[in-house]
Image (tube, rainbow, N blue to C red):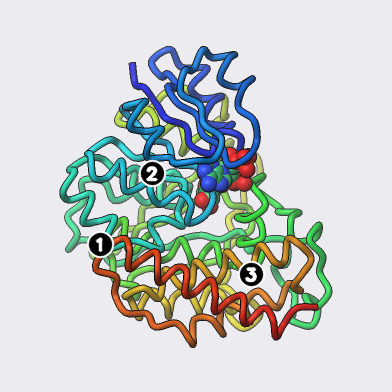
Amino acid sequence: MKRIAVLGATGSIGSQALEIIDANPELDACALASGSNELDRLASERGIEHAQVGGDLVALLDRAEPDVVLNAVVGFAGLPATLWALERGVTLALANKESLVAAGELALTARERGGGLLLPVDSEHSALFQCLEARAPETVHSVVLTASGGPFRGRTRERLADVTRADALAHPTWRMGPKITVDSATLANKGLELIEAHFLFGLPYEQIEVVVHPTSVVHAIARFRDGAALAHLGHPDMRVPISFALTYPERALTPVEPLDFADGLTLEFEPPDLETFPLLGLARRAGESGGTHPCAFNAANEVAVAAFLAGRLPFLGIAGVVEEALAAAGGAAAPDLDALIEADAEARLLAERALGTLVT
Ligand SMILES: NC(=O)c1ccc[n+]([C@@H]2O[C@H](COP(=O)([O-])OP(=O)(O)OC[C@H]3O[C@@H](n4cnc5c(N)ncnc54)[C@H](OP(=O)(O)O)[C@@H]3O)[C@@H](O)[C@H]2O)c1
């Protein structure tokens, strides 16, 4: 029996994870955490002793002693849980990409010390993990992350000037929480995933490509030096990568049907429009600059997306805020968690300042 701490249990990933756990007798939820929504019903239905709304995730994990931490918290707030699992060698099923983007080096050092498994839940990274598993690094030519393109694919900047919160939240292929849905509409999500892939698979940025693939059937592709390419395909349904991470190395039954290739399946790919969606390029530059630039990218993006969702910033202002904050951020590498938290706070302040000049 695997005892799983489900952090972010009330969210999109968290609730799908509970569905997977409930259907599998070898999985057991031993702890639940949320930000502000009540957990009483979720916990009492399952007889879960450790449930916490807000507060210190580390204290919860210390009490619950899980075998697996499913980190499905949204944003930088998930970082203590990521580091807790990696330091202790407790298997980390990671949906909370922001923690790895912000603290990549610290996280990898913690993983080295802890020696546990880091299993990506993000569908593209789960796909790459499977395509790359047991391959010698020198045989890998490059990898390709696919992006749906979001609800505004094909639009010009002019046609994005007055898009609303509701427009941005209408994602064509994935049903997700509001922050990642806006990130998908701006392509910041693919930028975060680019940095996430760099840290997860130890690949330099020039070996990580992003292509737009509107139907989200191909989740990622690994190219090898012999000219072969391996792709991972499936319906866009997060229960598949969640189940993979929670049951690894087994492959458990899920309610998701395999693809029907005789049913008119077409696979289309196109390059991303970096001019209309500048956050993908900004993320790549932040990743390549290293140090705490990825942390600053993430922090500024969190501030800008929250402002957009609150109606304080137009859609195109999100990239403006991130660009301005990144240009002013120090970016020096963080030797420890305190320095990283400081870099995150600095970038948030810079983003708030940029917001002051851009708010509607
Ligand atoms: N949704 C997807 O399909 C998908 C796919 C790939 C990756 N991801 C990643 O998975 C993470 C979660 O995404 P989501 O779509 O599930 O988001 P979501 O639906 O907004 O859920 C976020 C969860 O985090 C909880 N939370 C927020 N702040 C917290 C805190 N300080 N302490 C503890 N819990 C906190 C929320 O609790 P409340 O309900 O109380 O606010 C909620 O349970 C994100 O990093 C996202 O990028 C999501």
Crowd band around label 2 with a 10 angstrom C-alpha radius: few (<14), some (14–19), many (20+)? many
Mark 3: which amino acid?
Ala
Image height of 15 relative to 272, above or below: above
Q: Secondary structure at mark 2?
A: helix
- Residue 248 seen in the figure: yes
Crowd band around label 3 with a 10 angstrom C-alpha radius: few (<14), some (14–19), many (20+)? many
**Residue at 47% of width from left, 64% of height from top?**
192
Mark earlier in primary sequence (3, 1): 1
| Residue 195 horizontal side relative to residue 184, left or right | left
Image quadrant containing the C terminus: bottom right
Discs 2/1, front: 2
**Residue at 67% of width from left, 44% of height from top?**
175
Q: Secondary structure at mark 1?
A: strand
- Mark 3 lies on residue: 304
- What x and y, as percent, mark residue 154? 72, 72
- Mark 2 lies on residue: 81
Separation of disc 2 and disc 1 at Cα? 31 Å
**Residue at 57% of width from left, 32% of height from top?**
16
> Residue 18 appears in which quarter of the rendering?
top right
Mark earlier in primary sequence (3, 2): 2
- Mark 1 lies on residue: 140
